[in-house]
Amino acid sequence: MLLPVIGKFTRFVERLLPERGALLSRCLDPSALATPIAAVEAVRRTVARALQAVCRSVDAGLAAAAGGTTVSLPKDAVSVPEAADALRQAQVFMSDVNGPPDSDDEQRRLTSTLHALDHASRMAETAGGEAGLGSAGNGPVDARAVRLCAEAMRNAVAIAGEVAAPPDARHHAARIESGREASGPSEAGGMLGAPAVPAEEALVELERCAKALDDLKRTHRGETLSAVANGTMTAAEAMARVDMVRALETLAHHAWRSAAHLLDRGG
């Protein structure tokens, strides 16, 4: 019964309980635990914010590696460790929810949110352990892997930004997309001054990038290890390249699956 009015209900809770605390986890107010659907919405927005932060950090790291520069993020940017910590808080928060959901729809939404949380957590773990993303290998296949991962990150940012936005901002973005208002810059897509990308369109592109990276990873490994046998590459260099492409594929995969579940398109 609450699902049709979740937007109004969320705005009511936010007026009663102003967001406070850390930037990513401020939605996790203990008062929301009394109502499972409100708790799930709080976790869902926290996951979206953390996913957005991790994807922006990975994208910046890839751009810096490609340009031979150091990673440069805005002063107020959230780091990967901070995002990982917010996701851990979300896991603890979900463990404290009072009672199961009341309907099949709410149960499905809870399951999707937990899947999104799991994938985002795995992505943050991978990103936190790959300080030199994109630095290994300068061949055309390596460069294509970096481009695909960067494109995946940008599409995931667009999706996460729409989910993380307050309900009023999401409604405004939906009206722009449907053509009922003049189009213009929106915060729902994440980056101010950038054109909003519809979430469904971004998800299609994100899935394409993730699957392309999976295919590339399979062929790249065999070709790279073969280069050691014919003497064109050292074993250490080959392993570094294989590990890097594997990490890029893992990041894109978890970004795709987390974003898909945030949009209830996880399958």
Image (cartoon, grey):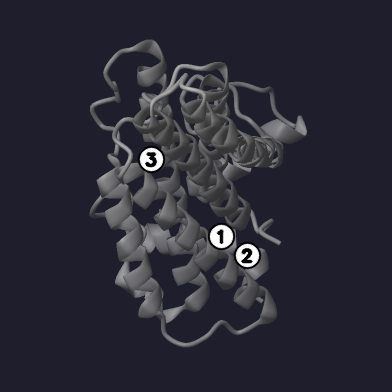
Q: Which residue is under mark 3?
A: 53
Residue 44 visible in the displayed image: no
Mark number, residue 8: 1
Name which residue lies at 36% across and 27% down: 61
| Snapshot quadrant of residue 85 | bottom left
Q: Nearer the viewer, residue 167 or 73?
A: 73
Name which residue lies at 49% across and 77% down: 36
Q: Which residue is under mark 2?
A: 5
Q: Real-space Cα distance between discs 2 and 3? A: 29 Å
Comes first in the chain, label 2 or label 3: 2
Label 1: state its secondary structure: helix
User: Which residue extends farthest front?
Assistant: 230
Q: Are marks 1 and 3 in contact (CB under 8 Å)?
A: no
Name which residue lies at 45% across and 53% down: 120
Q: Is residue 60 left or right of residue 202?
A: left
Amino acid found under the numbered disc labelled 3: Ala
Task: Please tell me how crowded label 1 is: few (under 14), some (14-19), or many (20+) other residues with Cα within 10 Å.
Answer: few
Label 2: state its secondary structure: helix
Q: Is residue 204 left or right of residue 247?
A: right
Q: Nearer the viewer, residue 208 or 166?
A: 208
Label 3: state its secondary structure: helix
User: Which residue extends farthest right?
Assistant: 179
Residue 222 visible in the displayed image: yes
Asked if residue 164 is positioned above or below residue 114 in the image, the reply reads: above
- Quadrant of the image for the C terminus? bottom right
Q: Are marks 2 and 1 in contact (CB under 8 Å)?
A: yes
Q: Real-space Cα distance between discs 2 and 1? A: 5 Å
Q: Is residue 183 left or right of residue 61?
A: right
Asked if residue 115 is positioned above or below residue 222 in the image, the reply reads: below
